Image: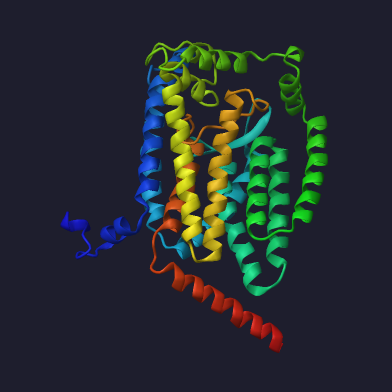
Amino acid sequence: MSYVSRANRNFLADWWLSVDRWQLGLCVALISFGVMMALAASPAVALKHKLPLYHFAYKQLVFLVLGGGLIVTISCLSPQNIRRFAFVLFAASLVGLLSTLLWGVELNGARRWIFIAGISVQPSEFMKPAFAVVCAWLFARQNTQFDSSGALYTFGMVIGLAGLMLLQPDVGQMTLLILVWICIYFLAGASLRFLVMLGCIGLVLGFLVYSEVSHVKSRVDRFLDPSSGDTYQVDRAMDAIAAGGITGVGPGNGHVKSILPDAHTDYVFAVAAEEGGFILAIAILATFAALLWRCALAVYREGLHWVQLAVAGLACLFGLQACINLAVNLNLIPSKGMTLPFVSYGGSSLLATSITLGMIIGLSRRRGSAAREASAYRSEIRIVASREVVS
């Protein structure tokens, strides 16, 4: 234990003593759920595709190990280096989004993936954490320098990125990105009147998307009126959740994974609720809730404004994605292909989620007195304000 003691202040000891171990432990718990569900839900899907029984499970385990390594590596970075990494990731993801429109692989009428070294990558997944950190820094910079350029830059960014995602089309990721921007803007001190105006504009644009994008219209219509089309997947998911009861039907005894094509991705929660029952479902929900609570505490304790906004934005991204997936499984919103972080199968989603949580843990690390940092930040504001007055 001396290797990580306070007397032996090597790099690993500094990281271990400064990291939020509750956040780290909850990440490990989610990864454990991911391992469990990869082994439970994916074999049936592999058999349908005439692949080896544990084809998807082995791939998911590899991605989970890589994801765990990403969390630890990124959490070791300083806030400044996390910000630099976010800018690099933002630029790379932007190139990837443009590439999908030119050379992307079309699946089910959408171009969201590109192949790099034989591996399919979804650039929009990696754009989300980078966007949250870049927006947080720009909004904080706006408050420090008493100008509105930061808000204008982020507004231009979200409009441009939403347009690129709509061209793919990927309405779900576009909506999630806009919601994250609204959350950060609200926390940065946006006018409620302006947010209401943006909400009205959003409703109009949403109606236009509903009118012009056929698969969006179909999903919304089937949600509002199940008799208007096929609702097979969500019906079977609801049946599975109900069949699970309190304790579930037991590991490996579930039926829904054998009949749903997306049982290992979009509807993995239904598989968990059927085989593990209410107990496993609540355990998964409680883990997500506890992790978000730790993020809220980190925001409360933080002294640097841009770090506060970044952690809040990343937590909103993580939490909203989980809520959307769970709401689809429970038939509370129209069907949308969005994974449950760490629990669903999917390489790009899992690695992007790992980057998100690595950033959260890295930005939440104790870096000395929060009061001194807050004081230094307020001093910076006063200095800039005095310069504005002199000029």
Which residue does the image show at 47% across and 15% down from the upper left? 245
How many numbered marks are there? 0
Give the quarter of the figure containing the N terminus. Answer: bottom left
Is residue 302 at all visible to an observer of this figure? yes
Which residue does the image show at 53% across and 47% down from the upper left? 315
Task: Judge from the rendering whether residue 176 lies leftward or rightward of residue 116; answer left or right.
Answer: right
* Outermost residue to the bottom: 390
Examine the rendered structure and indicate whether residue 284 appears above or below residue 164: above
Which residue does the image show at 32% across and 58% down from the upper left? 15
Examine the rendered structure and indicate whether residue 135 appears above or below residue 332: below
Nearer to us in this view, 326 or 336: 326
Q: Quadrant of residue 249?
A: top left
Task: Judge from the rendering whether residue 44 lies leftward or rightward of residue 217; answer left or right.
Answer: left
Residue 196 position, x and y percent, is 78, 49
Which residue does the image show at 27% across and 57% down from the upper left? 12
Task: Judge from the rendering whether residue 6 lies leftward or rightward of residue 181; answer left or right.
Answer: left
Q: In the rendered view, how is the structure colored?
A: rainbow
Give the quarter of the figure containing the C terminus. Answer: bottom right
Nearer to us in this view, 296 or 309: 296
Residue 127 position, x and y percent, is 58, 48
Examine the rendered structure and indicate whether residue 254 appears above or below residue 301: above
Task: Judge from the rendering whether residue 25 lies leftward or rightward of residue 135; answer left or right.
Answer: left
Residue 266 position, x and y percent, is 55, 26
Residue 123 position, x and y percent, is 57, 43
Is residue 102 at all visible to an observer of this figure? no
* Outermost residue to the left: 2
